[in-house]
Image: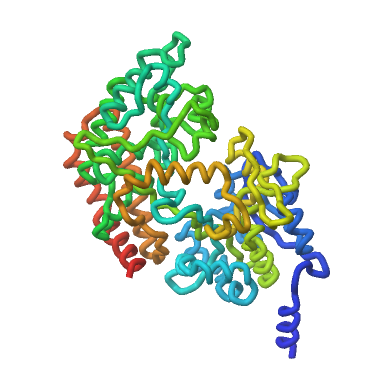
Amino acid sequence: MVRLLQKIISLKMSFPVKEKVTLNFMTQSSPLAPKDPNEKLIYKRLEKETNVNIKWKNYTSDVFVEKRNLAMSSGDLPDAILDAAYGDYDLLKLAKDGAIVPVEDLIEKHMPNLRKVLKEAPEYKAMMTAPDGHIYSFPWIEELGSGKESIHSVDDFPWINVEWLKKLGLKMPKTTEELKKVLIAFKTKDPNGNGKADEIPLAFIGKPGGEDLAFLFGSFGLGENWDHTVVQNNGKVAFTSSDAGYKEGIKFLHELYKEELIDVEAFEQDWNTYLAKGKDNRYGLYFTWDKANITGMNNKYDLMPPLAGPDGHVNVTRTNGMGFDRGRMVITSANKNLELTAKWIDKLYDPTQSVQDNWGTYGDKKLQNIFEYDKSTKMLKHLPLNGSAPVELRQKTSIGGPLAILDEYYGKVTTKPDDAAWRLNLMKDVMVPHMTAENIYPKVFFSLDDLDALSTIETDLFAYVIRKRAEWIQNGKVDKDWNNYMKELDRLGLQEWLKIKQSGYDRNHK
């Protein structure tokens, strides 16, 4: 009888609940955002709609992982962690230790918004499901284009100073040799006109990410990306940094280094240093996701097309990225209100809510708004950025998810953000025609044993690759060292790594 009564109460429970309930959540946010997330308009509206108060432990992104791990290891567990930043190994280990709970039954019973997303896009349910058949986390899903035209296909766009090109009477480079000549001109002909040799012909941050110069390797073979992984069109997984073309790319970059065309701080600088020089418009060519975040949305810089290498080879290497983050939110074993928590999380997957979770909101009387709400169409329409850096603007009001934004929402629930639509057009017109790979490496959910092996190998293997790359660009000894380098890759576990990655790829392409 008690169980039947509980079931009846459960079925009737809806928002707003009659009596205010408090849940304890942990999250992270930008230093630009309020210290108390409840000051964000999105959370104020959610509390009003649900009558659920969230008591937050909120940390800035730079210390969040440390604080999150400390809480989990000490047993001082919140009810849930939002914007959790958990990788697959973390999820499986926490599940094995009983620190987080499986959520597939909660999804089935209490989360109609998320169920609808998974019905319309069933591939995400497969990606959410661990090798043991359970689902341990709630994902972030953001679709912006598909296949080669996905906005995630290339992260390190090359931005070239077209104002300097015009002033020096130079054309947009189309080959690696033409780029070298352009960079020499940037160095020697004072294009900023201040009489000082303070121009930086080529700038980047020398580690994997959107500010790396991996894009340039596409002129010399398979190319390079942040995880050194490409899927060839015969279905074989390849390690980019052992490709013969990679060696040729290193030699080209050494030529640029010999001519003193590369930023002397490139191999050690952080984001803030990189940003400061970019805002001073000292760069001839640099790399980032969106130029608006570095040099502003103006006509000084334009996207440089992919370059032909010495043998005419042109290739845009695809990044193994997609708008999917498996570990965006978890519910811990300390939670005594599982149904309520699941229903609250499900609110985040409502289409109109998801759009705000991801980018920001409307109707804020204190901060610049991301959207205006059109009552007639019930659409959230992106407002102009008005010169604001999109990342900085959104970090003030968005919450990071979990959430789901499907391509079909555009034109029905919301508009595409101007910066995303602009970038998608650049991707389609400039990059896609030169992408030779038909597939990316998918979001494989490996077993704990495979993740252990991959993590152990990658820790040393990837660090070695980046270290040797930096050394070779500077000392030019790649030919002399190459054979020993290849042997060291094998010693560090490359062949086992390829076997595991190939097996994972094959399982996902049956």
**Quadrant in the rendering for residue 386:** top right
**Quadrant in the rendering for residue 102:** bottom right
Residue 36: where, in percent of width, then height?
72, 47
Total labels: the figure holds 0
Q: Is residue 508 above or below residue 439?
A: below
Horizontally, residue 5 falls left or right of residue 507, namely: right
Instruction: Note whether residue 222 is visible.
Output: yes
Q: Is residue 365 above or below residue 251?
A: below
Task: Work out which residue is located at the far front of the displayed protein and give it.
Answer: 376
| Colouring used for the render | rainbow
Q: Which residue occupies the foreground of this view, 129 or 414?
A: 414
Residue 258: where, in percent of width, then height?
28, 22
Task: Work out which residue is located at the far right of the displayed protein and give it.
Answer: 19
Residue 51: where, in percent of width, then height?
79, 63
Horizontally, residue 419 falls left or right of residue 314, namely: right
Residue 422: where, in percent of width, then height?
51, 42
> Which residue appears at 26% of the width and 56% of the height?
233
Q: Is residue 228 above or below residue 498?
A: above
- Locate the N terminus and report the quarter of the image it occupies: bottom right
> Which residue appears at 52% of the width and 59% of the height?
327
Task: Work out which residue is located at the far bottom of the displayed protein and give it.
Answer: 1
Q: Which residue occupies the foreground of this view, 205 or 166?
A: 166
Q: Is residue 253 above or below residue 380?
A: above
> Which residue appears at 67% of the width and 55% of the height?
379
- Locate the C terminus and report the quarter of the image it occupies: bottom left
Horizontally, residue 143 falls left or right of residue 247, namely: right
> Which residue appears at 33% of the width and 63% of the height?
505
